[in-house]
Amino acid sequence: MFTTSLTLNDLLFLLDGAWVTLQLTAWSILLGSLAGLLFGLLRALLPRASLPLAWVLDVFRSVPLLIQFVLFNALKSIVGLNLSAFAVGCIVLGVYAAAYFTEIVRGGVLAVPLSTRRASRSLGLSYLQDLRYIVLPIATRVAFPGWLNLVLGVMKDTALVMWIGIVELLRASQTIVTRIQEPLLVLCIAGLIYYVMSLVVARLGARLERRWQEND
């Protein structure tokens, strides 16, 4: 007969951790999307002038995220920044997401055919109008699948914030495992919660893409 020491309070504790995971994901993606949009446009429209920016972003894409967490957390203490662990997690994840989203935006902008841009200019649109009404709408649809994959990736990467003291879903599950010594059950439940959260995000993204296709 199957028996377990897992209680309702343990399940609620896991859900609290999942809520922290969602908050980290939301704030990180917001920061990463805004910065990545700006950086991506700079990389696409001013490639030579933004070359130093590309080198900096390459560093954040190349260095493992866990090392970035540890280094930034140590730097915060050395400099004396009064930031909470949650803020540190959002900043590091946000910069990490921005480094990847920059290339997603850049690819989306460069995917707009040059002939399309020339046609818009021949119709009398200014450079900014061409960017707003032609380039950005097309680039958004091209970049959206990559952005959605980035959201799902960041959601899973939030598990690394446990190393700076944040109790998110994985840390909550480890705490419960330490107490009741049932790792298989607890981690399966945690994995199921991750799956449900990712599934909801993926389904919402697919629904939005279908709406775009229907409006074409």
Image (cartoon, grey):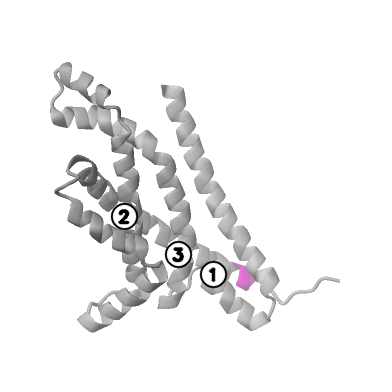
Question: Which of the labelled discs sits on residue 158, or is there none?
Answer: 3
Which of discs 1 and 2 lies nearer the camera? The answer is 2
Kindly identify the residue that appears in the image at 22 percent across and 19 percent down.
Answer: 119
Q: Is residue 8 magenta?
A: yes
Which dot, 2 or 3, sits closer to the camera?
Answer: 2
Q: Which residues are magenta?
A: 7-11
Q: Which mark is residue 98?
A: 2
How packed mark 2 is, by other alpha carbons closer than 10 Å (few <14, some 14-19, many 20 or more), is many
Q: Given the image, on which type of amino acid does mark 3 rest?
A: Thr
Compute the Cα span from label 2 to label 3. 15 Å
| Amino acid type, label 2 | Ala
* Residue 72 location, quadrant: bottom left
Q: Is residue 123 magenta?
A: no
Q: Quadrant of residue 145?
A: top left
Is residue 172 shown left or right of residue 109? right
**Along the polypeptide, which appears first: circle 1 or circle 2?**
2
Q: Residue at (45%, 64%) from the top-left corner? A: 158
Q: Residue at x 63, y 68 (%)?
A: 187
